[in-house]
Image (tube, rainbow, N blue to C red):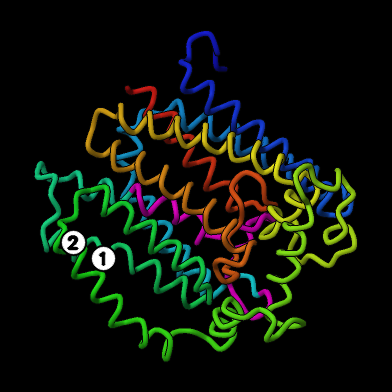
Amino acid sequence: MINFKNIGVTEKLLFFSIIIISVFGLTLLYSATNQDIDIVIRQGARLSFCFILMMIIGLIDINKIKIIAPYLYLVCIVLLIFTIFWGHDSKGAKRWIIFFGFSLQVSEIIKVVLPIFLAWFLSLSEDKEIDLKKLLISFAIIFLPIVFIIKQPDLGTSLIVLLCGLISLFLGGVKKKHILYLSGLSLILTPLIWKFLLLPYQKQRIMTLIDPSSDPLGSGYHIIQSKIAVGSGGFFGKGFLNGTQSQLEFLPERGTDFIFSVLAEEFGFFGILILFILYFIIIARCIHITSKAKTYFSKILSGSITCIFLLLILTNISMTIGVLPVVGVTLPLLSLGGSSLLSIFIAFGIMFSINRRN
């Protein structure tokens, strides 16, 4: 299918770094789920499917992906609307669509589709500078899916989608004065968002970030247990399957949101360092692909994917060590999940496609 003798160093480093982290993720998942081999097998099946999809996308001409960009965006909007009315209800939230027994969280897929569509829109004209008209249309493109995601409700994902869109705008060449206007507008809107948009439990999460000890058995429980797990790992960790917070189930959501805490507890600073090196290789190779991209569309898209990948890593790790409130963002390539994994591998497939055109 793919002859590795014919691919460059960038693709090899990127490909094998992704494989190593993914396999390591399965190992962590085995520990985080109390040695539940069925969950590991299902995650392995998802990974296999995503790897095949990534390689197929990598073989597609990036110009063909550009052509279908508007249709991808339209399909996602339709599916988001469908989710609000007919989505699967779980704990009062409708975030998933069930297809023949498989669940799909469209808000995860839009993280990749939105930058594709924005890159397509910004590359329509030869003028690479974003004027006020382009900026307003771009904001409409960004906020349309966000409105539907908030209705699910899923404020954490909507903020990530917003940042994904803003990253694409920044890389597209937004003017400095517009950045200043947006910063001022954000400051003005912050009190209104706090009063009218945030739900009580979301406000509580933010207040807990400031003082987790104020509610140690409630909203502060996640952060406190995560900090204990991360801090108790030391330099080399407690050893595989020897973590106390994870194995004794003190650590919540240890297979998804807090899998980094499992890593820190069982493999310590040394394990974290290895993971960071692998992430650094991936990001460095993505930056290299972006710098070599030949078209305006490819540069915006590859740069956006690189920044979004870094954003997801920083958000998850910051959340687990108590720097950010708990927002439900998984750690790329490591955490248990289907839709988040699918979106990441689609993004990497696009990076391979762009690199093949360089």
The CA span between labels 2 and 1 is 6 Å
Q: Position of residue 123 (x, y in %)?
A: 20, 44
Q: Which residues are magenta?
A: 90-116
Q: Position of residue 6 (x, y in %)?
A: 48, 10
Q: Residue furthest front?
A: 235
**Is 251 situated left or right of 338 in this image?**
right
The tag on residue 135 is: 2
Which residue is drawn at the image coordinates 69% and 57% (left, top)? 256
Could you say which is closer to the camera, residue 187 or residue 13? 187
Could you say which is closer to the camera, residue 35 or residue 48? 35
Vertical position of residue 140 compared to residue 114: above or below: below
Vertical position of residue 215 compared to residue 136: above or below: below
Amino acid of disc 2: Leu
The residue that label 1 is drawn on is 139
Amino acid of disc 1: Phe
**Is 200 situated left or right of 62 in this image?**
right
Q: Residue furthest bottom?
A: 195
Quadrant housing residue 21: top right
Which residue is drawn at the image coordinates 17% and 45% (left, top)? 124
Could you say which is closer to the camera, residue 237 or residue 285? 237
Vertical position of residue 81 compared to residue 25: above or below: below
Secondary structure found at label 2: helix
Secondary structure found at label 1: helix
Q: Position of residue 215 (x, y in %)?
A: 70, 85
Q: Position of residue 17 (x, y in %)?
A: 59, 30
Q: Residue furthest top?
A: 5
Circles 2 and 1 in contact, beta carbons < 8 Å? yes
**Is 219 situated left or right of 205 in this image?**
right
The tag on residue 93 is: none
